[in-house]
Image (spheres, helix red, strand yellow):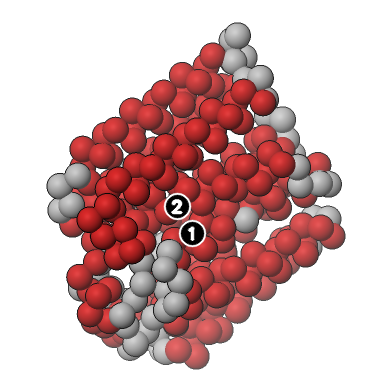
Amino acid sequence: MTKDTLIDKLNAYERLMRLDKPVGILLLLWPTLWGLLLAGQGHPNWQVVLIFVTGVILMRSAGCVMNDIADRHYDGHVERTQNRPLVTGEVSVKEALLLAVGLSLVAFSLVCFLNKQTILLSIAALFLAATYPLTKRFLAIPQAYLGIAFGFSIPMAFATLTNQIPPLAWWLLLANVFWTIAYDTEYAMVDREDDVKIGIKSSALLFARYDVLAIMLCYAAMAAIFIYIGKIMAFGTYYFVGILVVLGLIVWQYQMIKTRKRQHCFTAFLANNWIGLALFASIVMAYFMPWH
C-alpha cells in the first residue's frame, strides 16, 4: 500500500467514524459530563472522567460505523449521505465490521477498570448502540431510543461514583431523551423527503405539520426537568440563570426552524451543542458559585 493510498484509507475511516464532524461527540459528551458532575457532587474523580470521555469518543465512533453498516443500502438514496465511505466503496463491509468491533473492545477494556455494576451497564449500552440503526425500520420515534442510547452514560456515571442509581440519574436520562428527540427531529427535518422515498421512520414524519410544536414541547420538558433537578438539589441562583440562558437558546432555535428550511433546521441541530454547554455550565456554577 502506497503512502497516498494509506492516507486515503485513513481519511475514509475518519469519515466513517464521523471524526470530521465532532458535534456528534459533543452531543454525547454533554450528558455524560452532567451525570459525572452530579454524581460526583461537583468533584468527580478525574481518572473516571478521563475513562468516560475516552469511552464517549470510542463508542460514538463505533456507533457511527454500526449505523452506516445498517444503512448502507439506504444512504446512497439520500442526498446528505450518498458520499459516505461504505456507499462509495472506499471501505468494505468487512473492514467496517472489524473497525466497529475494535472500537467497542477498546471502550470495554476501559470500563473494566470500573466496578461490576458499571461493566454490566456498559453491555446494555453496547446493545443500545448496536440496535439503534434497526429501530428506524419499525419504531415511529427512533429518536427516543437514540436518547436512551446517548444518555446511558448517565446511570453508568452514578453507578461508578456512588455505587447506586438514584432517581436523579433517571430524571437526568429522561431530560436527555426529550433533548435528543428535539434536536434529532430538527436533523430529521433535513432528510424528510428522502426518508419518505426509502421508507425510513422518523419523528419528523410522525409529527408532520406539528413538528415545530413537538420540538418546542420536548425542549420545554427538558428545561422543566432541569428546573426540578435544581429545586431538589437546592442549587443557587447562578444555576437558574444558566437555565434562563438555555431557554433563550431554545427561543433562538425556534426562530430558525419555524421556516422549516433545510439549512435552517440543520443549523439549529448544530446549535444544540451550545444548549449542552449551557446546561453543563449551569451545573458547574451550582457547585462552584452557590449564590442563594
Q: Is residue 71 visible?
A: yes
Residue 233 sits in quarter: top right
State the residue position of label 2: 180
Residue named by callout 1: 144
Q: Residues within 10 Å of mark 2 (few under 14, many from 20)?
A: many
Rounded to the nearest angstrom, the CA distance separating label 2 from label 1 is 7 Å
What residue is shown at x 73% (from left), y 35% (from top)?
A: 40
Q: Which disc number belongs to residue 160? A: none
Residue 110, position as x, y percentages in the image: 72, 61
Q: Position of residue 159 (x, y in %)?
A: 77, 49
SS for dot 2:
helix
Identify which amino acid the numbered label 2 is placed on: Thr
Residue at 59% across / 10% down in the picture? Answer: 291
Residue occupying image coordinates x 27% and y 81%: 198
* Amino acid on which the number 1 mark rests in the picture: Ala
Instruction: Give 155 or 5, whichever is nearer the viewer.
Output: 155
Q: Nearer the viewer, residue 170 or 164?
A: 170
Quadrant (top left, top right, bottom left, bottom right) of the N terminus: bottom left
- Label 2 or label 1, whichever comes before in sequence order: 1
Residue 48 appears at what percent x and percent y? 72, 47
Q: Is residue 78 above or below residue 29?
A: below
Labelled pair 2, 1 in contact (Cβ < 8 Å) = yes
Helix, strand, or loop for circle 1?
helix
Q: Nearer the viewer, residue 180 or 94?
A: 180
Q: How many labels were placed on the picture? A: 2
Residue 104 % position (x, y):
62, 71
Q: Is residue 29 above or below residue 251?
A: below
